[in-house]
Image (cartoon, rainbow, N blue to C red):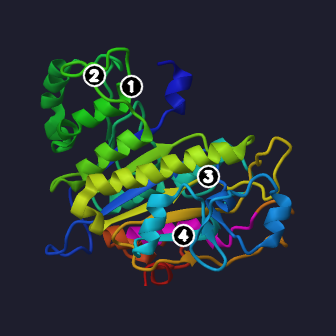
Amino acid sequence: MNRREFLKGSSLAFLTSAARLNISANERKRKLIVIQLEGGLDGLSLVVPHSEHKLFDLRRNLVPDDLIKISNEFALHGALKTFSNLVATNQGAVIHATNFPYTKRSHFEGQNVMQGGGKPFEYQSGWLGRALSLLSHDPTALSLDVPLIVRGSDRVTNYMPSLITAVNLDRENSFISKISALHEGVVQEKLDSLRLRYAGKGPNNRTGNQWVKGRSPTELAAYAGNELSKPNGPDAVIITIPEFDTHSNQISRMKKLVNELDQVIESFKNGLGPVWDDTLLMTLTEFGRTVEENGAKGTEHGYGSAALLAGGLVTKTEVMTDWPGLRQLHEDRDLKATIDYRSVCSACLEIAFGLDHEEIATKVFFEPKLPRLKQHIFG
């Protein structure tokens, strides 16, 4: 695997806590799943404002033809079959015309804002990592480096075998046994996930003491869901689906990507089993796409986008939006973002981990006046 292939691949990180705040001892442990959609998700294709006639004028070749209507104003992309079923059973919701407060359209800056929660390269820690620090979590990232989003605690660690395509389990187990006490057993429990994330696929699909499965987002989600379902499993999982940068042939590329996202959600749900009822899943992206299609039947980097929420902790099935319309665009090209996605993240942290909004606003996002949306989103 060369460096380019590695950087293009999906990724996975497990987060396990040593203590919790504001969750009673008798309350069931809640789980948080964060899916990063890297590349800039076109929210207008994921959740289509089908009542906006101007959309069809500006996107003659981009509006999917198999929409799943969920309201008089909005419809889901036809590939979101699992998610549409969750909406029908009050376990799925949409946040539209939203994003982090970033408008410059750079992948490097946008992804840093998405994970750091501030201005580009303002922080050396991530918003989820800072939240985990408040909970005395001990995150373990199964990767060559620690993703920015989970940085924030001095206790955050990472682990990666030196041989990617031929992990010797006897040797790795010996190494892990020596350091497992430092990680409270987290690394020992996650060895199989490590192999799943980095081993990749080979000519003989060998198993046993060498290497096993692939690392597609769907395979990672199935494994991670199973890990989350265990009594002593992690509290949160972060998974990345790349390549949402749809500059050309967007209609076909979006169908493939959205289908993959839908399968990831389904894999998580199946892997979690009954624990799905105590789980909240959320998506992130660094920016949206332009409203008007380009000459290559794609879109350019934009601003406002859409996000999905799913799981048993979702209590209100709706498209939550302060809809700006398509007549007054941001810089005459992009959907405006009228909901600060940091407020959505704050609401999710409140629900999943019992943190107080004021503490999240001041110590996680360093924005004391960050609007509280928990009641609006979750009732």
263 above or below 306?
above
Give SS at disc 4.
strand
Q: Position of residue 114 (x, y in %)?
A: 56, 53
Q: Circle 1 is placed at which residue position?
A: 200
Please say if the residues under marks 1 and 2 sit with CB atoms less than 8 Å apart: yes
- Residue at (27, 22) in percent of width and height: 211
Q: Looking at the image, how many numbered discs can be counted on the residues?
A: 4
Give SS at disc 2.
loop
Question: Could you tell me the amino acid type at mark 1?
Answer: Gly
Quadrant the C terminus occupies: bottom left
Q: Position of residue 337 (x, y in %)?
A: 69, 68
Mark closest to the chain's N terminus, 4 or 2: 4
> Residues under labels 4 and 2: Cα distance?
39 Å
**Along the line of sight, the residue nearer the viewer: 301 or 59:** 59
Q: Is residue 141 left or right of residue 375?
A: left
Q: Circle 3 is placed at which residue position?
A: 286
